[in-house]
Image (spheres, helix red, strand yellow):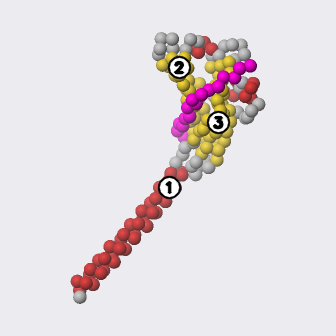
């Protein structure tokens, strides 16, 4: 009789430990999801992209309309927006120039279609902001080169970077 009772108690203890293991696993999943929501990050999306040649014929102004979301549970801010322009030189060397966003050089065609993104820009938890970013570039840098690609890099207030790469950038002509 003692063996049967100890086997029943051992089975009951095994069942109880399995149920406890299941509930602790579910609790850990919940904690992991909460921790993921607290992770600081911003997500940029490109809504539109253009470039316009400067009126005096020297250089271009690139304009990108960005949507920036903050999926985390903590507020964040966009501290800097840069464009990395990659191009091939006449000697076939791939170069990249980093240009800071500058709202003073907004192309006239775009200026009226939305507000510029003012940096720094606060992005509340679970919120989205949008705005135009402008990147002027001198004509001497673009003479005889082939533009290979663009990357818009956002740096948040914690020095974490996120980026978006425009595939097609349309030229505005007057």
Q: Is residue 5 visible?
A: yes
Q: Earlier in the sequence, mark 3 or mark 1?
A: 1
Percent x, y of residue 9: 30, 80
Query: Taking 95 as reference, is 9 left or right?
Result: left
Q: Find out whether residue 161 is within the magenta segment.
A: yes
Q: SS for tag 3?
A: strand
* Stretch in magenta: 158-174
Q: Residues within 10 Å of mark 2 (few under 14, many from 20)?
A: many
Query: Mark 2 touching mark 3, by CB under 8 A?
Result: no
The residue under the point 36% across, 71% down is 17
Q: Which is closer to the viewer, label 1 or label 2? A: 2
Q: Residue at x 73, y 35 (%)?
A: 115
Q: Residue at 60% of width from left, 45% of height from top?
A: 70
Figure quadrant of residue 50: top right
Image coords of residue 1 (percent x, y): 23, 88
Residue 100 in view in this figure: no
Residue 10 position by quadrant: bottom left
Q: Secondary structure at mark 1?
A: helix
Label 3 neighbour load within 10 Å: few <14, some 14-19, many 20+: few
- Nearer-N-terminus badge (2/3): 3
128 or 50, nearer to the observer: 50
What residue sits right under mark 3 in the picture?
47
Instruction: Give x and y (percent) for residue 34.
Output: 52, 56
Q: Is residue 16 above or below residue 58?
A: below
Q: Point out the tag, 1 or 2, that comes first from the N-terminus.
A: 1
Pointers 3 and 1 in contact (C-beta within 8 Å): no
Q: CA distance from mark 1 to mark 2?
A: 42 Å
Residue 172 sits inside the magenta stretch: yes
Q: Which residue is mark 1?
A: 33
Count of number-bearing discs: 3
Circle 1 Cα neighbour tier, 10 Å, few/some/many (<14 / 14–19 / ≥20): few
Q: Is residue 50 left or right of residue 11?
A: right
């Amino acid at each position: 009789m003692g063996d049967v009772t100890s086997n029943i108690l051992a089975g009951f203890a095994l069942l109880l430990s399995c149920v406890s293991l299941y509930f602790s696993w579910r609790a850990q999943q919940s904690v992991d999801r909460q921790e993921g929501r607290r992770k600081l990050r911003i997500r940029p999306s490109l809504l539109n992209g253009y470039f316009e040649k400067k009126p005096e014929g020297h250089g271009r102004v690139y304009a990108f309309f960005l949507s920036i979301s903050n999926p985390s549970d903590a507020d964040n801010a966009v501290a800097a927006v840069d464009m990395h322009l990659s191009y091939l030189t006449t000697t076939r060397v791939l170069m990249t120039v980093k240009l800071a966003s500058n709202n003073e050089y907004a192309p006239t065609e775009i200026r009226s279609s939305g507000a510029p993104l003012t940096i720094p820009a606060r992005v509340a938890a679970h919120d989205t902001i949008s705005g135009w970013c402008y990147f002027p570039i001198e004509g001497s840098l673009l003479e005889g080169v082939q533009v290979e690609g663009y990357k818009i890099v956002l740096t948040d207030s914690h020095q974490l970077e996120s980026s978006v790469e425009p595939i097609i950038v349309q030229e505005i002509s007057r």
